[in-house]
Amino acid sequence: MIESFPNLVHYHDQQIASRSLSQKLGLEQTVTLYAFDQGESISPEVSTDDKLLQVIEGRLLLSLDNQKIKLEANSLVAIHKGQMIALEAARPSKLLQIDL
């Protein structure tokens, strides 16, 4: 168990910071916590695995197969293998990604 896991990654000016939680949780699946500064983005890419994305805080703009979706804190979305995905932080945001 990890208490207060959002505090394990911190915001940095004009950067995306990340921290793997897989080892701490004893999992083989990839579990990653991200902190996006406002305006930072992940360029469009094809998802190589099914995954879950949960916004912990902030607001992210998700482009999923060219559909734009606003994700607020506590939003949860499933991404399927082969889908085109891009993310942009509308404000400083933290995101938990679990590869399935």
Image: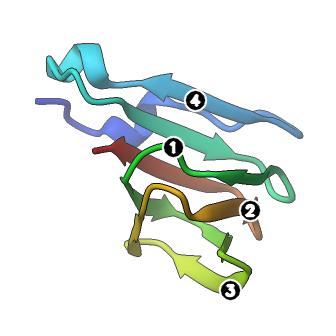
Q: Earlier in the sequence, mark 4 or mark 2?
A: 4
Mark 2 in CB contact with mark 3 (< 8 angstroms)? no
Q: Which residue is mark 4?
A: 18
Residue 61: quarter of image: bottom right
- Kindly give the residue lying farthest to the front in the view shown: 82
Above or below: residue 6 compared with residue 81: above
Disc 3 marks a residue whose amino acid type is: Gln
* Image quarter in which the N terminus is found: top left
Q: CA distance from mark 2 to mark 3?
A: 16 Å
Q: Which residue is mark 2?
A: 89
Q: CA distance from mark 1 to mark 2?
A: 22 Å
Q: CA distance from mark 1 to mark 3?
A: 19 Å
What residue sits 83% from the left and 51% below the top? 40
Q: Position of residue 46 (x, y in %)?
A: 64, 52
Rate crowding at label 3 as few (under 14), some (14 to 19) or many (20 or more) other CA atoms within 10 Å.
few
Q: CA distance from mark 4 to mark 2?
A: 14 Å
Q: Which residue is mark 1?
A: 48
Above or below: residue 23 compared with residue 27: above
Mark 3 in CB contact with mark 4 (< 8 angstroms)? no
Considering the numbered disc 3 on the image, is that residue within a helix, a strand or a loop? strand
Q: CA distance from mark 4 to mark 1?
A: 19 Å
Q: Earlier in the sequence, mark 2 or mark 3?
A: 3
Q: Which residue is mark 3?
A: 67
Q: CA distance from mark 3 to mark 4?
A: 25 Å
Disc 1 marks a residue whose amino acid type is: Thr
* Image quarter in which the C terminus is found: top left
